[in-house]
Image: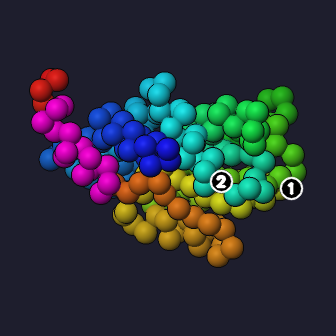
Amino acid sequence: MASQDMDNLLTLLAKYSYRYKPEGFMLASGKVSNEYIDCKMALSHAEAGPWVAALILARADPRAVAVGGLTMGADPIAYATSLVSAGGRNLRWFSVRKESKQHGSRKLIEGDVPNGANVVIVDDVVTTGGSTEDAIQKARAERLNVLQVIALVDREEDGGLERIQRAAGSDVSVQALFTKADVRREWERLQPTLRAIA
């Protein structure tokens, strides 16, 4: 079943998230690349939620009580995982703000996650690893115990996963479900079908 979930999600990422443009796209890192992966396009489809949740749940450390990361790349992954876990592991979701709220409780982390909770940090795409590193630092500043990091796609550039591993520490598992090369290969495989639909 996990293998089918992987295949299904990869196809969705290739169809809706992967883009190629010779003149290039400006990335969040400030670099220009002729390949762009916008995971939110695939994750906005209803069928993506159960697939990504099943894959995260299959890998999530059994000690974890919550899953989340920096808004908004992590949000759909965390929400879906929490919803699908209901009645089983019952993982909570949380969302790390880029800046603290300027009113009310001035929270940096949204969601009911107590101090000392064991958590899994998730993210959609890793390029430099900066947003994931930010999520780890902020989670720890709010006294959460980061056990694991799971990204949806590693762009395989700028040593992103290695940077995350250094930030997380050697005792924290860091992994990505797919690489950019995986998504590109599936996109290439689908090209005859996608051209026929267009």
Q: Callout 1, which amino acid? A: Gly
Mark 2 packing: few (<14 Cα in 10 Å), some, or many (20+)? many
* Dominant secondary structure, magenta: helix
Residue 66 image-quadrant placement:
top right
Q: Which mark is residue 168?
A: none
- Residue tagged 1: 116
Specify whether residue 191 is in view: yes
- Residue tagged 2: 60
**Residue visible at 55% across and 33% down in the picture:** 50
177 is higher (above) or lower (below) than 90: below
**Left or right: 2, with 133 as reference point:** left
Quadrant location of the C terminus in the rendered image: top left
Between 4 and 79, the residue placed more toward the observer is 4
**Left or right: 1, with 25 as reference point:** right
Q: Position of residue 34 (x, y in %)?
A: 22, 50
Q: Position of residue 189 (x, y in %)?
A: 19, 45
The magenta segment is 181-194
Q: Earlier in the sequence, mark 2 or mark 1?
A: 2
Between 12 and 135, the residue placed more toward the observer is 12
Between 79 and 115, the residue placed more toward the observer is 79
Spot the residue most to the right: 115
Between 119 and 1, the residue placed more toward the observer is 1
Mark 1 residue element: loop
**Residue visible at 31% across and 45% down in the picture:** 36
Mark 2 residue element: loop
Q: Callout 2, which amino acid? A: Ala
**Residue visible at 54% across and 47% down in the picture:** 55
**Residue visible at 29% across and 35% down in the picture:** 15
